[in-house]
Image: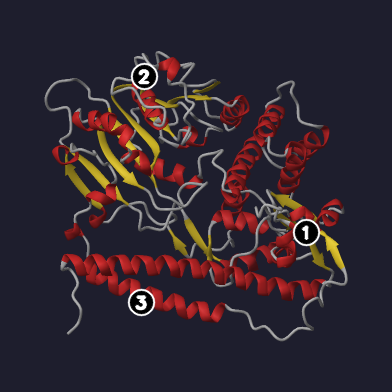
Amino acid sequence: MTDNAAPPAGSLVTGSDIARLAGVTRAAVSNWRRRYEDFPAPAGGSANSPLYALAEVQAWLAKQRKGQEVSPEVELWQTMRAAYGEQMQTGLAEVAGLLAGEGAPEPPDDVAGRVRELSRTASPADVVTGLAERFMDSARRSGSDQVTSERVVRAVCHFAPEVPAGGTVFDPACGIGSLLLSVAADEKASRRGQEIDADSARFAQLRADLVGRSGVRVVAGDSLRADQWPDLKADLVVCDPPAGVTEWGREELLLDSRWELGTPSKAEGELAWLQHAYAHTAPGGQVLMVMPASVAYRKAGRRIRAELVRRGIVRQVIALPPGTATSHALPVHLWCLRRPMNTGVGDTNHTVRMVDLTDNDPEASLEPRPDQVADVPLIELLDDVVDLTPGNHMRALHRDYPGEYAALREELARELGRLAALLPQLAPGDGPGALDAATAGVAELARAGLVAFEGTEPVSTSDQLDTDYLRGFLRSSVNARRSTSASGTYRLDGKGARVPRMGIDDQRRYGSAFRALSEFEEGIRKVHELSRRLADIAREGLTTGALTPEK
C-alpha cells in the first residue's frame, strides 16, 4: 500500500519517496539504510539529501517484502485521521502524551490501541518522529501552511550561523518544533519556544523530551500580545511567522518598546514579528526570519526597512527557490539580521549581501553560484523604495546570457521530446457511456475499508483496488460535475464520486494510462516555465546588448 502514486520508472527518488512507496516513515527508511548492507547505494544527490534509483529500490522492497502490507505506522496514522480529522495537532499531542506516560487527555481507545501495538516494535522517539514527519508531509501535499515545510527548515539550517557553545536558540512561533529542534548543531544549546496553539506547543515539548533533547522548553501563548520570555536574549532567533495576518494586536501594542525600528502598520504583521525576534537577540546575536517576498518592497514597510539598512542590522537577504514554502509556489525570502556588539564605529556592515536562488530547483543545492550573489552598498538601498528584493540587485554582468540561453534551448528541446513519448497509446473504446453500467461509490469503498483519505485524495488500502485508476476516474467530467456547485464553484468531492467496476488487471491498465497523463501534465507545466524563462533571458539579453540576432 502506498500513500501516493509511485514515481515514474527510471527516476531517482528521495528517502521520503521510499517511505511513501513502502507505507512507512522516513525514520524507518533511515533504519533500513543502517541495518541492511544490501540496501541500494545512493545514485545521486548529496550526503545530506541522497537520491536512489527507483528500480533498485523497488527490487529491494520486493526482496524484503516491505511495503506489501499496511504497516503499523500507516494504520496508526489512518486511525488518527479518522478520529481527529482536521484537529491533528490535538491528536499528535495526545499520542505523544501517551508515549510519555502522561495522564489525561488521552487519545480514543482505538488510537491508543494502535499506539501500544506500534510501541512493541518501535521506540517512543521513532514513533513521535514518524508522526511529525507524516504531519509535515500531509500538510505539504494539501498545500497547508500549518507547519514549516521541510524545505524551509533545510534552508534555515543551511544559512544559520554557528551558535556559541552552550548558547541559546529561540523560536517565538515554533509550531510543532521543526525549526527549533533542527537548527544549530550544538546539542547543549538551550532552546526556547513559544506557540499560540496549545496542542502544537505541547507536542513540540513532548517531542523534544521523547527524542532525548534536554534544554528545551516550549510554552503556549501569543508571542506578540503575551510574550512568555520577556527577559530572554538569544544567540540565534529563528522564526517562520504567520503571513498575511492583519489582526496581530497593533492597536493594543502601539507604544510597545519592541518597535525600535518603527511601529508596523496593520498590514505589516511580518515586520512586527521581525522586530519581536530582534528584541530577543543578545549583543552579537542573529535572526533568521522567513518572510513573504512582498515584505521586501511594500510601501507600508519602507521606514522600517530603511532603519534596518541605515543601522547596518540587515546582513543578508536570500530569495529561496519557488516551491520552498508549503502553501504556494511563490518564492519566500530569508532575512538575516545581526544585533551589533556595541554602537561604536566598526561593528556595522557597509553592504547587504543579496542572494537570488529563484532560478534553482527547491531540492537542489542551496549554495549560490557567483552570479547569484551581489554585495550591495547601503547607500544604493536607501532610496525612495528601499527594495530588498535580491533579484532586483543582481548585476547583469554576472549573467552568462549566451550560455544560459543555449542551455535553456537544449533543455526545452529535450523536454518536448520526452513529452511526446509520455502520451499513452489509446485504442478506440466501446463509445461514450460504455463504463456507466456498473459503478461503485467511493464512499462505499471507504466504508468497506478499501479506501482511505489523505485530505480529499483517496488512497487504496487493498491489493484489489488500484490507486491510480481510482484517482483517474475521480477526475472524470461526470465526477467533476458532482463536485461543482450551482454557483459554478469547484470543490473536489472524492467521497461523492463513483467509479466503474472492473477487475484489478483492467484497473491497472487504466491506472497506468492515468499515471502517464499526470506525468504529461506535469511536463507541460515544466515546458511552460522553461518557455517563460527562455523568453525572459532572450529579451533581456537582446535589450542589454548581451545577445544579438545572427546575421
Crowdedness near tag 2: few (<14), some (14–19) or many (≥20) residues, C-alpha within 10 Å: some
Query: CA–CA distance between discs 1 and 3?
Result: 43 Å
Mark 1 or mark 3: name the one nearer the start of the chain: 3
Q: Which residue is mark 2?
A: 233
Query: CA–CA distance between discs 3 and 2?
Result: 52 Å
Q: Quadrant of the N terminus?
A: bottom right
340 on left or right of 11: left
Q: Which residue is mark 1?
A: 497
SS assignment at label 3: helix
Mark 1 residue type: Ala
Mark 3 or mark 2: name the one nearer the start of the chain: 2
Q: Of tags 1 and 2, which is closer to the observer? A: 1
Point 59% across, 79% down: residue: 423
Q: Give the image location of residue 422, x and y in percent.
A: 56, 77
SS assignment at label 1: loop
Q: Of tags 3 and 2, which is closer to the observer? A: 3
Are the residues tagged 3 and 2 within 8 Å (C-beta)? no
Mark 2 residue type: Lys
SS assignment at label 2: loop
Mark 3 residue type: Glu
Relative height, residue 499 to residue 125 (above, below): below
Q: Which residue is mark 3?
A: 410
Q: Give the image location of residue 548, x and y in percent.
A: 18, 75
Point 62% across, 54% down: residue: 19
